[in-house]
Structures are given as C-alpha cells and as structure tokens.
Image (cartoon, rainbow, N blue to C red):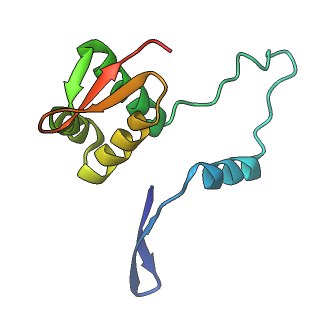
C-alpha cells in the first residue's frame, strides 16, 4: 500500500493506492534496474516484502506451537499483521498450506504443523 499526501495547487490530496504483486512487478520493470555484469544473478535476490515476512512468521507460529486453535492463532496474527483483515487472509493461506493441517475442534478449528 502506498499513501500519497500533499497538495495540487490549492487542493489537498490524500490518496491511498493498494498494489498487488503483479502491480509491484510492473512498476519494478519500469525502473529498469541494471545489475553489474560481474555480479552473479543468484546473489541479486528479490527483496523480502512485508507480506512474505508475515507469511513466514504465520507458518513459524503454527510450527512452533505444533497445534494451535483458530481464535488464539487469529489473535497472534492480528498483533503481527496490524489488522483483523490481514490476519484472516493469513488464516486462509494457512488452510491451503501443505505444511498445515486444519481440523474441526470442539469449539474452533485446530491448526497443526505437519512436515511436507
């Protein structure tokens, strides 16, 4: 997400842009960053985005817990992600992750770590 604030002439501007991975890729392609020829392409890695870091952290929470119930996991993810919506998106990703098994518990779903 990119927030632009300022003025155009006498008019105030407060604009928020939400960009998905494809939008960021197209924007990055426009920058045409060149890599010196003596640098190995494997060394030049894509920067870790906040979404990637949150995803790894969400997986690590389940892995370290071994098994965790949905409401507890949601609470931890809300603290990390900063919003309920972002935390719920991570829960959906976890449901489809091959390393996580989700079963219906007595009161809430249980997220369990399984080695893929």
Q: Residue at x 40, y 15 (%)?
A: 114
- Frontmost residue, 45 versus 52: 52
Q: Position of residue 3 (x, y in %)?
A: 42, 61
Instruction: Identify the residue at image location x=75%, y=48%.
Output: 29
**Image spot of residue 63 (x, y percent):** 33, 16
Query: Is 112 placed left or right of 74 in the picture?
Result: right
Answer above or below: position of 41 versus 28. Answer: above
Q: How many marks are shown on the rendered structure?
A: 0
Q: Is residue 86 left or right of residue 42?
A: left
Give the answer, above or below, for where 40 lies relative to 69: above
Relative horizontal placement of residue 58, taking residue 69 as reference (left or right): right
Place of residue 90 in the rendered image (x, y in percent of width and height, measured from the top left): 37, 40
| Residue most extreme to the right | 37
Task: Identify which residue is drawn at 49% across, 25% down.
Answer: 98
Residue 81 picture location, percent across and down: 29, 41
Q: Nearer the viewer, residue 47 or 57?
A: 57
Question: Which image quadrant for residue 112?
Answer: top left
Tell which of 115 and 26 is nearer to you: 115
Write the residue at 33% across / 31% down.
102
Viewer-proximal residue among 102 and 40: 102
Q: Quadrant of the N terminus?
A: bottom left
């Amino acid at each position: 997400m990119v927030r632009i604030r300022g003025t155009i002439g006498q008019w105030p501007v407060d604009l928020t842009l939400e960009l998905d991975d494809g939008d960021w890729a197209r924007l990055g392609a426009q920058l045409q960053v060149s890599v010196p020829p003596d640098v190995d392409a494997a060394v030049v890695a894509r920067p870790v985005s906040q979404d990637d870091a949150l995803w790894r952290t969400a997986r690590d929470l389940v892995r370290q817990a071994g098994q965790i119930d949905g409401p507890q996991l949601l609470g931890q993810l809300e603290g990390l992600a900063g919003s309920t919506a972002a935390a719920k998106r991570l829960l959906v990703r976890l449901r489809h992750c091959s390393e996580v098994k989700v079963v219906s518990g007595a009161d809430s779903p249980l997220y369990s770590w399984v080695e893929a």
